[in-house]
Amino acid sequence: MNKQQRWDRYFYNICNVVGSNSKCLSRQIGAVLVKDKVIICTGYNGPPRGIPHCEGDICPRRKLGFKSGEGLEKCPAAHAERNAIIQAARLGIQVKDSVLYLNTCIPCKDCLIEIINAGIIEVVCTEDKLYDELSEFLIKKITLFGGFNIRQFSCLVKEEKSKGIYLPLTEIK
């Protein structure tokens, strides 16, 4: 395991621990903001401070018949990456030029906009799957201008693919 893979493994494990704090009944997502290999803030998917999450043992979206990723307007939770950025702002921590690690797929369009506008320079995620179709449009535009990368955790990429760990946009699912 090379140095990058060791750091990726370290931050991947922390994403999983942070995500385990989520009360979401569907998914436990963790986000870790890192600058110069130092964690500057974390976040997990969940509702605003002081607002209860799902009541009982069933997700309200599931109760209404929505599949995973559908009916999000019925969910009181914010995405982990959004919560990490908001938490950093609340604490006065600058996220410009940081790296965002996520134990999930490529962020949704809204989160990508916030990530880019916050000055985050790289997103590292577990899979090259898109959260939504609009993410792909943004990613293609971003890569034309440079200064922003999205890649998989190198510790999770098969040996054959690890030579070029940056996600080839033509292969995004």
Image (tube, rainbow, N blue to C red):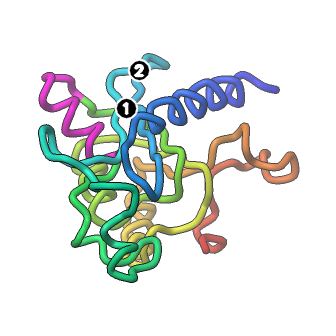
The amino acid type of the residue labelled 1 equals Ser
Q: Where does residue 173 sit, x and y in percent of width and height?
A: 61, 74
- Is label 2 in a helix, a strand or a loop? strand
Query: Along the line of sight, which residue is nearer the eye, 60 or 92?
Result: 60
Instruction: Mark 2: give few (<14), some (14-19) or many (20+) Cα within 10 Å.
Output: some
Nearer to me, 25 or 122: 25
Residue of label 2: 39
- Picture disc at residue 12: none
Q: In what element is the residue under mark 1? A: loop
Q: Position of residue 45 (x, y in %)?
A: 34, 47
* Mark in front: 1 vs 2: 2
Q: What residue is disc 1 on? A: 98
The residue at the far bottom in this view is: 65
Residue 119: quadrant of the picture: top left
Q: Residues within 10 Å of mark 1 (few under 14, many from 20)?
A: many
Query: At x 40% / y 47%, what residue is drawn?
Result: 147
The residue depicted at 22 percent of the width and 29 percent of the height is 88
Which stretch appears magenta?
Answer: 81-94
The majority secondary structure of the magenta stretch comes to helix
Tell me if residue 159 comes above or below residue 129 in the rendering: above
| Residue 156 drawn in magenta | no
Q: Mark 2 or mark 1, which is nearer the start of the sequence? A: 2
The quadrant the N terminus occupies is top right
> Measured from the top left, where is residue 19 in percent x and y?
45, 38
**Of residues 145 and 80, which is closer to you in this image?**
80
> What x and y, as percent, mark residue 164?
72, 49
Dot 2 amino acid type = Ile
Horizontal side of residue 38 vs 77, given as left or right:
right
